[in-house]
Image (cartoon, rainbow, N blue to C red):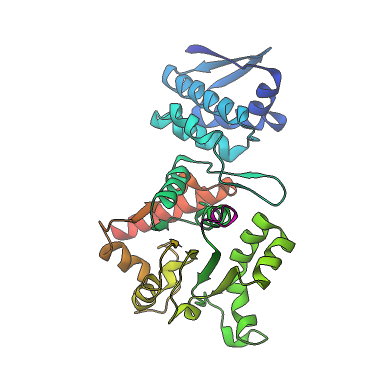
Amino acid sequence: MTELTYEAQNVETLMNIYGSFDANVKVIEKELNVKIINRDTNIKIIGDEEQSKIALDALTVLAEMAKSGEVLNEQNVRYAISMAIEGISGEIVNLTGDYICISSKGKPIKAKTMGQKKYVETIRNNTITFGIGPAGTGKTYLAVALAVDAFRKKEVSKIILTRPAVEAGEKLGFLPGDLQNKVDPYLRPLYDALQVMLGVEGYQKYFEKGLIEVAPLAYMRGRTLDDAFIILDEAQNTTPEQMKMFLTRIGFGSKVVITGDITQIDLPDGKRSGLKEAMKVLKNIEGLEFVTLTHKDVVRHPLVQRIINAYEKADALKRK
């Protein structure tokens, strides 16, 4: 058995690390099979030598997150443990202090994992970025935050958000209203993200002025999109023809983010995914980059990570 000690800088940091009803340290104890004891501002770790060192590194990561103003939760704790296991806990400094923009309620929006950090930096440094990964990894949310930041800085004059209106078991024809009413439910996640960044009134003002456009992918045909930040969401549900059509709309001064999850394709049987084909066809093109996010980058409820892991294991078994 080994006993290691982590010394917190102050009581506030210690309380944040421990969490409500010691929930955070209980996760560390369970995952790493160690015992954690609090003595003043010292945290003693008792257990197997290797596991205790991982726990110490995880506590160091959590302390850095707490110092940057992060309110720690189970997702943070599990990510800190994964960083410690991979031996990259020192890289946590790259996640602290940098934010993309401020939401309408004054909350700083920033990357919460190393995968998200890479995604954000890739978008900033390239004309076209493909963000590929499972649900909950922040693909769309971070892209919208970057779009709002570019718009506020007057780097672009317009934000355009689009996605294919592909049915996931439902039928458009049975929905009430005209065409716009029918496709609005498909665009709702994009509306929601924009309203978080700009507020409902701010979003409405820019929308009415035509500075923000949220529309189905079919509406992009025949246009040239200059001086805009364009996001194509749910790109796994495009056909190769739609993907080519979209990519050839891009004009001067524009930045494009294309997001998708190739494990959730809702196209009819026999239809090829434009996103999957683009991943093969568009390799090694200057100014265009692909970023893959994984279950480690999920920032929703921890159960989402477990669900994604379970499906990934099932798919791996099928392939075998």
Q: Quadrant of residue 133?
A: bottom left
Image height of 315 relative to 79, above or below:
below
- Examine the rendering and report whether any part of residue 269 can be seen: yes
* Residue 56 in the image, given as x and y percentages of width and height: 51, 20
Image height of 63 relative to 240, above or below:
above
Image height of 68 relative to 251, above or below:
above
**Residue 154 in magenta?**
yes
Nearer to the camera, 43 or 260: 260
Nearer to the camera, 205 or 34: 205
Q: Residue at x 48, y 74 (%)?
A: 164
**Residue 226 in magenta?**
no
* Residue 211 in the image, given as x and y percentages of width and height: 60, 68
Q: Residue at x 33, y 56 (%)?
A: 287
- Examine the rendering and report whether any part of residue 257 can be seen: no
Image height of 3 relative to 54, above or below:
above
- Residue 213 placement, left or right of 254: right
Q: Residue furthest right?
A: 201
Q: Residue at x 51, y 11 (%)?
A: 3
Q: Quadrant of the C terminus?
A: bottom left
Q: Which residues are magenta?
A: 150-155
Q: Residue at x 39, y 32 (%)?
A: 86
